[in-house]
Structures are given as structure tokens and as C-alpha cells.
Amino acid sequence: MFDYIWLVPVFPAIGVLINGLLGRRLEAINKSLIHWIACGAIALSYIVTCTIFYQLLQLPEAERFYQVTCFSWINSGVLQTYIAYQIDPLSMMMAMFVIGVGFLIHVYSIGYMDGDPGRYYRFFVYLNLFMFSMINLILANNYLLMFLGWEGVGLCSYLLIGFWFDDEANAIAGKKAFITNRVGDFAFLIGMFLLFTGLGEHGVWSLQFNEVFSNVHYLSTSQATAICLLFFIGCTAKSAQIPLYVWLPDAMAGPTPVSALIHAATMVTSGVYMITRSNILYSMSPLAMGVVATVGALTALFAASIGLVQNDIKKVLAYSTVSQLGYMFLGLGVGAFAAGMFHVLTHAFFKALMFLGSGAVIHSMHHAYHKVHSHDDAQDMRNMGGLKSKTPITYWTFLVGALAIAGVPGLSGFFSKDEILWQAYSSPQGHWLLWLIGAMAAGMTAFYIFRLIFMTFFNDCRAGDAAEHIHESPLTMTIPLMVLAVLAAFGGYLGVPHALGGSNLFEHFLEPVMGMGDGKLLQDATTAVAHGAHHAVHAAAGHITEAAHAVAGHAEGGAHHVGHEPLWVEYLLMAVSVALAFGGIFVAYMFYIVKRELPVALAEKFSFIHRLLLNKWYIDELYDVVIISPLRGFSYFLWKGIDVGVVDYIVNGVARIVGWGSSAVRYIQSGYVQSYAVSVVFGTVVLLAYYFLKAL
């Protein structure tokens, strides 16, 4: 089945073509045909992915690397690029949960988008196109094809966030996401150019992963640092890190399935995947690793602080996503690449669950408000309360997700978050300050997520006359919630750490792709075999060993090195993180169940801080003053001053001069024979007078 990996992206592409070209007619015949085609395409992709993944597990560890070349893409001079896909533990792990969660979101969308007239088929076309782009991103075997998928998910995010474009807020949010991502994509492109030319100086003209990683020792530390930092700028946009995170909270304007698709397992994890895929390159630059860890830690704390006081249920989850992405980059920056990817996996489960759960709440609230013709905001948690008994499935599944993200022991979020915090403290690239920032963000996370739980599901319902019309969502929406709740509860057991008696199966599975160990050498040697270079295996292995040792020297021991801390230190830090989680839950319980007047009193007492957090630290306003307004003013100057005032004036001036000249001359061509005769006589007289005077 390895040779049929191309079917995985092809099925969503077929769904795009069928619904895109025939969707309007199919919708007129039977609307259910639309979602059967769209969901069926993703289901077929998932079946192929599961089959390949199963076969991959049957192989010995050293043979879990395979490449399938479909056709030549770009052949220009020294650049030869192919549409080719890579099968290895990292790409298949990503494909498994991206396509699986994507399928659940497709199913959920059937119920959520059911009442949207005239645009039903278009929504599923965009979802399929998004999945096609994301699959290309994660299965690509070279940076250029990865960038094609990278740009594709950026385009689809614009289409999906601004799906209800007749609402100005949605249109602006889609535009903001698109433009912000273009800034990061420009940096990504420059990084690719530097990588291509940097290796090209030594005769390696390629952007193919195995060739790049086998020859990274040719790059100097400064070159590797520049490339890694440029790639990371691309990640700050795509994966919403400081300073380019601003588009992600506004993306909540789109339909809730879009929020789940973008925020959970797909687009925002692209940056994490790209750095993990490039781990050997990043390990060459301690400076770049430090920047990644620092920005990740600060983003985790910064976004968590904003989430403490937000009232829009989706905005709370949006800033939670930004914060959790910060955790992932913190893990990557301290060399814990497998731990960062493990948090990507668990986050995909519990965050998709909570976004879809919030969508179920909003769906019920909108339906209830529509019954009583109310115009209240159905996403404002201050209008909710008491939904525990009205939407029991949504409540219990949402609670599982909340416990997981809070880091309660036994659920998925505990294992992945604890691993990142431990690595932030104990690894050679880590620091106790990074651990402290991460721990503070963990406590805030537990508080704001249970603030959401208590405001939404507990106390008296504040929906007024609409309360009696609130009911549970249809099965197409609740079944995905139940599946994701099971995954959010038990998905973490793939990575139980050694300190708790586990063997960390997840890290062991990814080990051949990570760092500079023997697995990495086997990976590149096996790739050489796959390309037909059987005669060069030993030479390739020796060459790769040289590269690995050079990189290991830069990385001060490699990405998988763990500090020699006593075991009791790990238990102590684990206990602190658990105490912070339960402490955050307890404070939220006291504030929003026991003494509900406390939040109001504190907001009044510390009004400046509350206003600062409620307005998101005024970052959008700061960007408007420092960046957007000057650019808008400069653009206005170029428009009115240069384009209209100079260019148009010159062009129009030439036209006016020609017009004046032609207006004067056109009287000669009057169409009257008498006028022409007079002109002839007059000309004859002038000529005769000229020759007569000349003769004199």
C-alpha cells in the first residue's frame, strides 16, 4: 500500500472537483449528496492512511522510511523538484490524527451548517480543499511541496474564516488572517532561498528533506541560525505566536467547525510540524532554539492572561489555543521535539472537542434565541448558565476536554504538558525560568477553562425567555463529541513517562526521525537505498555520521539528551504542576460558584489590569497606530500624491494637449466642398506669393 500514498490527497481533491463543479445541481437534487461526497472523500483517505500506518508498524524500525515519487514538478537549471510523498513515523502520525479529526469535523458540520441556505456545498468544498492542502503539507518529502500545502491552508483559512462574508466582521477577520500569514510566508520563502543557495555552494542543489538533512554540516552556524529564524517567523504567523498571533482570535468570526479545524489539529500545528521535521537543522543553532523556547513560553503566558477575562466562549478557546501552541514551541525550543509533537496530538483531541462543544452550545443558544426573536449574543457566556441539565452530552464531553487541558492527572493533557515542563527544566537547552513561566501559564489555563465551564453550564440560566427552548444538539454533532472525549481522556497513555512506570511509546515511535541518534543515520541510509543507491549505502552512512557528529557538537549533546536530575526532582515538579491545576480549578469554583460577587469586586478594584486584559493588552490598537495607520497613510500618499497627482496628471495632460491640438485641426475637415475650394485657392495664392516674392 505504500505506493498508493498518493490516494490520500487525491480523494479530497476529487471531492473538491465534484462538489465544486456540480455542487449547485447536487444541492438542488438532494442536499445530503454534498456531505456524503465530502465526508466520503475524507473517510477514504483515512482508510488508506490507516492501512499504510498499520503496514508501517509491521516493519522493523530501520525500515520505516519510504518515498513515493508521483511526477516531476519543476525542472529548471539546477533545481529539480518532484511531487513526492514521504512515509515515516512523523508524517504518518500527523496524517492519522489530522485526517481522523478532520473527518469528525466534517461529520459535525453536517448538523451545524444544515440551516445555511445556498452555501452548503461551498462550505464542504472549502473543507475538502483545506484537507487536501494540509495532507500535502505533512506528507511532502521536500520543502517546496510543503510550502505549497502551507500556502494552500492559508488560502483556505481566508475562505473559511470569511465564509459568511456578508457580515463585515467576518470579511475583515478573513482578510486579517490572510495578510498576517503573508508576512510569515515571505520569511519562510527567504529561508528556503538561503537554504537552497547555502547548500548549493557545496554542490547540493536540493530542497528534498533527506538530502538537506544529510548535508547540513556544510552550513555554518550563522547560516543555520538565519535559516531557522526565518522559518520560525513563518511559524509565528501560521502557528500564532508573538508577534503575529493577532489573526487567530479574530478567526472566531467564522463557523465553529472552521474554528475547530484551524485551531485543533491542522493549520496552527503546521509550524510545530515544520520545526519538528527540521529538527536536525534547528539543533545546529542554539540561538534559534533559544528564540523558539523563549517566544513559546512568553506566548503561553501572554495568551493565558488574556483568556482569564474574556466573555465570548470561542474567544476564550482561541486564546487557549495560542497559549497551548506556546507550550508546543517551548518544548521544541528546549530540544524536546517528541514532547512538543505529543502535545500536538493530545491538543488535537481536547481542543477539537471543546471547540465543537462550544459550537453545540452556540447552536442551541442561537436556536433558542431565534424562537423568541431575541438579538442577544449567543456566544457571550454572560447570557448562558444552567446548560448542564439542558445539554447533558455537550456538558459531560466538554468537561472531559476541560479536565484534559487543565492537566488533571490521568487525562491526555497531563502527560504531554508535564513532559514539556519537565524538559523545559531539565534539558541542557532548558532553564528554570522557562519552567516557571510554563507552570504559571498552566495554573491560568486551569482557571480560565473552568471559569468557562462554571459560567456556561452551572448556576441559573441567564438566557431569559429563550431558556425553555434550549435543547441538546443533533446526533451528527454529539457523536463526534463523544468520540473526541474518549480520545481526550485516553490519548495520553501513548506517552506515559518513565517516571510513572511507562515506556513513552510515542517518543519511542518518533525516535528514528528525531535528533542525531542511530535512527537518524538509518533513516538517511535507508532513504538512499529507496532511491536506488544500493552501492552507496556504506558511503552514505559514513557521510551522514560525519554530519550527525558535526550537528551534535553544535547542539551540545543532541536534542534527546536529558539532564541528569534526580528522580525526586521530576516528581516534585510534577506535583507542583498538578497543584497549580487543582488550584486554578478551585479558584474558579470559588469565584463563579461560591462567591460570585468576587470577580466583579476584583474587576472594580483592579480596573486598570482588568481593562488591559479585557482589551487584549491593546495589541491590536498598538499595531494599528504603529504599523497599519502609517502604511495606510503611505498608501494614501502613493494613491493621491503619486498615482493621481503625478502619473495620472502627466498621462491626462498629454491627452489634453493632443485633444486641444486635434480640436483646432478638426475644423479643417469640415466636410463642406466650398471650404475645401477656398482652402485650395488660399493655398495656391500663398504659393504664388511665395515664388513671386522669391523671384524679386
Image (tube, rainbow, N blue to C red):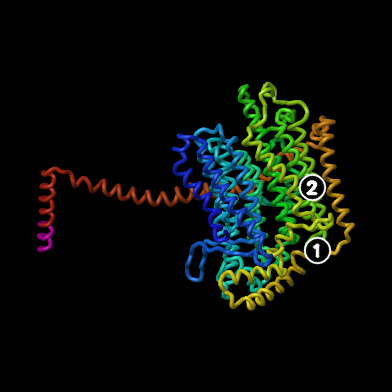
Q: Residue at x 9, y 60 (%)?
A: 692
Q: Residue at x 71, y 35 (%)?
A: 311
The residue lying toward the viewer, choosing from 117 and 239, is 117
Disc 2: CA contacts within 10 A as few (<14), some (14-19) or many (>=20): many
Q: Residue at x 67, y 70 (%)?
A: 522
The quarter of the displayed image where residue 430 is located:
bottom right
- List the residue tagged with mark 2: 442
Residue 277 magenta-drawn?
no
Residue 690 magenta-drawn?
yes
Say what amino acid the circle numbered 1 marks.
Answer: Val
Which numbered disc, 2 or 1, marks the residue closer to the eye?
A: 1
Looking at the picture, how far across and down is residue 552, in whole percent?
Answer: 73, 70
The vertical placement of 15 against 164, above or below, is below
* Left-right relation of 511 to 185: right
Element marked by disc 1: loop
Question: Magenta residues, as a range?
Answer: 688-696
Question: Magenta region's main secondary structure?
Answer: helix
- List the residue tagged with mark 1: 562
Looking at the picture, how far across and down is residue 532, in whole percent?
Answer: 56, 72
Say what amino acid the circle numbered 2 marks.
Answer: Ala
The vertical placement of 473 against 258, above or below, is above
Instruction: Say if residue 145 shows up in the picture.
Output: yes
Looking at the picture, how far across and down is residue 622, in whole percent?
Answer: 67, 46
Q: Which part of the image, by quadrant, shows the N terminus?
A: bottom right
